[in-house]
Amino acid sequence: MNHTESRQGLPSPIVDFHTHLFPDKLSDAIRRQFVVDYGWGVLHDLYWRQTVEYLREHGAGPIIYSNYAHKKGVARSLNDWNITILKELDDVYCFAAYHPDDDDGLAMAADLLSHPRIIGFKLQLLVQRFFPDDERLFPLYELVMEKKKRLLLHVGTGPVGNEFVGIGPFKRLLARYPDLPANIAHMGGLEYDQFGALLDDHPALYMDTAFSFLAGAGLMFNLGNDFLEAHKDRILYGSDFPNVILPRGEEIDSLLSRNLSQDFYDAVFRDNGLALIQKLVS
Ligand SMILES: [Zn+2]
């Protein structure tokens, strides 16, 4: 059965720049923690292979996933797993795991970046509980820049904040590394305007749409279409799949129903992602 979604205005294929693949046991643990922390029951109870199959059946070409080290000592086994599954999966790319307290972390990071489909690292500052401008991370940032790779940063205050996330710590980081090549997850939510205002002065920043356009989630992006059109070259579609609490298609429909230009939809759902991937793997 072919579930490929053809929606008016949606290019094909789409590039999904924010998904999650974890080993099965860790997926179970994360889902349990979502219920405890946020009262969220994840809608799509899919493990990694099924996740990729589902996305492919729903129009995804290149898929970019991440995982992160919630504590010291787990990054290496996660990254070994990443390398194993990348062998099995075509056209799938990874933001790998990193923890600054791992003794061999930087050497491991350097090795990983020689893999053509490991395109950088994910830092989930809300969960990992350190500041983005923690000096223990500076060697990682410098390595990523030297190797022309990227970061995926969960650095906004949604769905909940703590002292480690938000515009303040992130601005301190940009003061030190103004050309930081980073994707800001979730459009910078919930401080959309303040994160959005960084794009003009920091040309290596992108934002992803994950979780920002779900009408039913109460996390709605609150800048208008003018902002989206003006920054369409710097926005990447991402679904956060499978860790979503509402149907993935709702976010696509909500973006399409905003009546943005076809240029916007082509850029955000496909072309920006293809161009970025091409740069990161070459
Ligand atoms: Zn995510």
Image: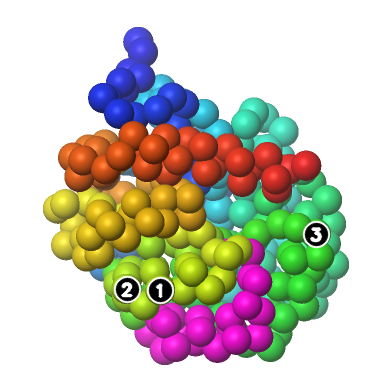
Rendered location of residue 277, percent (x, y):
64, 42
Give the CA separation, mark 1 to mark 2: 6 Å
Residue 121 - label:
none
Q: Is residue 163 magenta-colored?
A: yes
The residue singled out by tag 3 in the image is 147
Residue 53, percent from left and from top = 46, 27
Q: Residue at x 60, y 86 (%)?
A: 175
Amino acid marked by disc 1: Ala
Q: Which residue is mark 2?
A: 193
Q: Position of residue 219 (x, y in %)?
A: 22, 63
Left or right, 70 with reference to 14:
right
> Which color scheme does this rendered protein use?
rainbow
207 magenta-colored: no
Cα distance, mark 3 to mark 1? 27 Å
Kindly check if marks 1 and 2 are in contact, taking CB atoms under 8 A apart as contact: yes
Camera-side residue: 150 or 101?
150
Amino acid found under the numbered disc labelled 3? Lys
The label shown at residue 197 is: 1
The mark lying in front, picked from 3 and 2, is 2
Q: Is residue 169 visible?
A: yes
